[in-house]
Image (tube, helix red, strand yellow):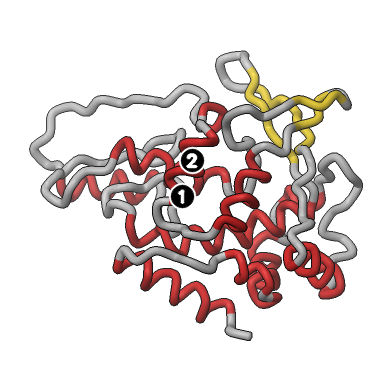
Amino acid sequence: MQSAETVLGVLRERGRRGLPVNELYRQLFNPQLYLLAYGRIYANHGAMTPGVTQETVDGMSQAKIGRVIDAMRHERYRFAPVRRVHIPKKNGKTRPLGLPTWSDKLVGEVVRLLLEAYYEPTFSERSHGFRPGRGCHTALREIANTWTGTAWFVEADIADCFGSLDHDLMIGILSAKIHDSRFLRLVRNMLTAGYLEDWKWGATLSGAPQGGVASPLLSNIYLHKLVHRDSSDSGIHPRGPQGT
């Protein structure tokens, strides 16, 4: 079994070279990826927050990873609906937040690791939102160091970005490079698992859940089609609902 870093390194190289991926789903059988995913999310505050079940990071074990992998091998793994709560916003409104089960958080992080390794090398150097080692400070640093003659900027926001992603279009974008129907079905299952609010189930006909581990990356992949320009373009490209 290859190490997690070896798997992710191969995906980065294929992404850098623009080569498609044919057998991504079988990487979900690699326990090393789940251990890496666990190491990245176990300390998050949400790891102790239950979703629609009482399952949390407590009780995590290699046996649990083994059960998830067994379900993956037989294509029996199904994402549970997220528990939806509403978080107050500064303008007095609220935004929905989805709380997945712990197992779904773990699998979502493995999916995110695989997709990020492949797609990260394809993103613009002027994109800063929801990317490793980047954020508002790197965007401001680039503006201060590069855009010295600029008098003004235009700020824009995409309303309900996560909630507006078209599932068919999202899967279509992924399928252009990921030639693996099993992996694409898993992502679609993650997107369409629905939500529970006041213990009433609701369908997710579009969008990626706020609070979903892979949602920010999926939005970056989705918006790459909107904001992508060739290398001669000098704009700072927002990726994700918080822009640059």
* Left-right relation of 140 to 26: left
Residue occupying the point 81% across, 30% down? 196
Which residue type carries mark 2?
Answer: Met
| Label annotation for residue 198 | none
Q: Residues within 10 Å of mark 1 (few under 14, many from 20)?
A: many
Residue occupying the point 42% across, 26% down? 158
Q: Which residue is mark 2?
A: 170
**Is 223 in front, or is 132?**
223
Q: In what quadrant of the picture does the C terminus appear?
A: top left
Q: Which residue is mark 1?
A: 174
Residue occupying the point 13% across, 29% down? 151
Q: Position of residue 231 (x, y in %)?
A: 16, 52
Q: Quadrant of residue 199?
A: top right
**Is 37 in front, or is 206?**
206
* Left-right relation of 56 to 13: right
Distance of label 1 from label 2 (alpha carbons): 6 Å
Looking at this rendering, what residue extends furthest in the left direction?
A: 149
What is the secondary structure assignment of the residue under circle 1? Answer: helix
Where is 125 relative to 235, above or below? below
Residue occupying the point 77% across, 50% down? 78
Which residue type carries mark 1?
Answer: Leu
Q: Position of residue 11 (x, y in %)?
A: 44, 70
Marks 1,2: beta carbons within 8 A? yes
Q: Position of residue 241 (x, y in %)?
A: 46, 33
Q: In what quadrant of the picture does the N terminus appear?
A: bottom right
